[in-house]
Image: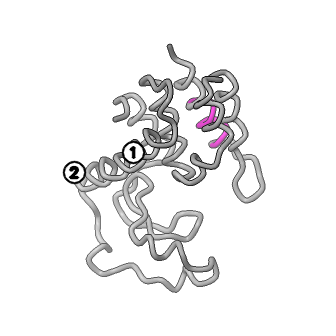
Amino acid sequence: MISPKMRELLKHHEGVRYKPYRCPALLWTVGVGHVLYPEQGKLPMDQRMAFPLRQEDNRIWTKEEVDALLFYDLKRFVTGVSKYCPAGLNQGRMDALVSFAFNLGNGTLQRSTLRMKHNRGDYQGASEEFLKYVKAGGKVLKGLVKRRNDERTFYLQP
C-alpha cells in the first residue's frame, strides 16, 4: 500500500469532493477522483454530458464513504504497479508510481518508458520520465508540473 504521507499528497493533488461533479473529461466523479460510472468514459466526449447522475448518487457523501472509495481505488493501482514495475520497489518508488498510475491509468504506466527504465534498474532515468507527463489538452499545467516533481521526489527517496 502507499504511505500515509503519499495518501495526503494524493488528496492534495486530486482534491477531495463530497458532492458528485464532472471532471475535466466530463465524467461523474466524487471523492478523490473516483469515477462513478466507468461506462461513461467509453462514450465520445460530445455524448458524456447527456449521461445522467443517478438519483442515489446525487447527495453529499460522507468522509467514510470517500475514504472507502479511495482505499478501493488505491488497491487497483497498487496491484498495477506491483505487476508492471516489480523490480526494485521501495516505499518511495511505490508511492510515486501509484500516484502516477492513479492520475494517468495503469495502461499508461504499462506502456511508459518510465516503466521500462524502472524495470531495468535505471532509477535516475526513470525519475526524469515523470516530468514528461505535465500536459493536459496540449498545454503544460502548473498543477501537473508540481505533482510530477512531488512524485519524482518520492521516487528518488532511498
Q: Is residue 39 above or below residue 50?
A: above
**Could you say where residue 68 lies in the image, as x and y percent from the top left?**
26, 51
Label 1 residue SS: helix
Looking at the rendering, the stretch of residues picked out in magenta corresponds to: 144-150
Residue 146 location, quadrant: top right
**Could you say where residue 103 lies in the image, as x and y percent from the top left?**
53, 49
Residue type at the position of mark 1: Thr
Q: Which residue is mark 2?
A: 64
Residue 61 location, quadrant: bottom left
Residue in the image at 53% along x and 63% along y: 23
Q: Are the two marked residues, 1 and 2, in contact with CB atoms closer than 8 angstroms?
A: no
Front residue of this view, candidates 81 and 36: 81
Q: Which residue is mark 1?
A: 79
Please state, as top left, top right, bottom left or bottom right, where the N terminus lies in the image.
Answer: top left
Q: CA distance from mark 1 to mark 2?
A: 23 Å
Q: Is residue 148 magenta?
A: yes
**Could you say where residue 6 lies in the image, as x and y percent from the top left?**
42, 32
The mark lying in front, picked from 1 and 2, is 1
Residue type at the position of mark 2: Glu
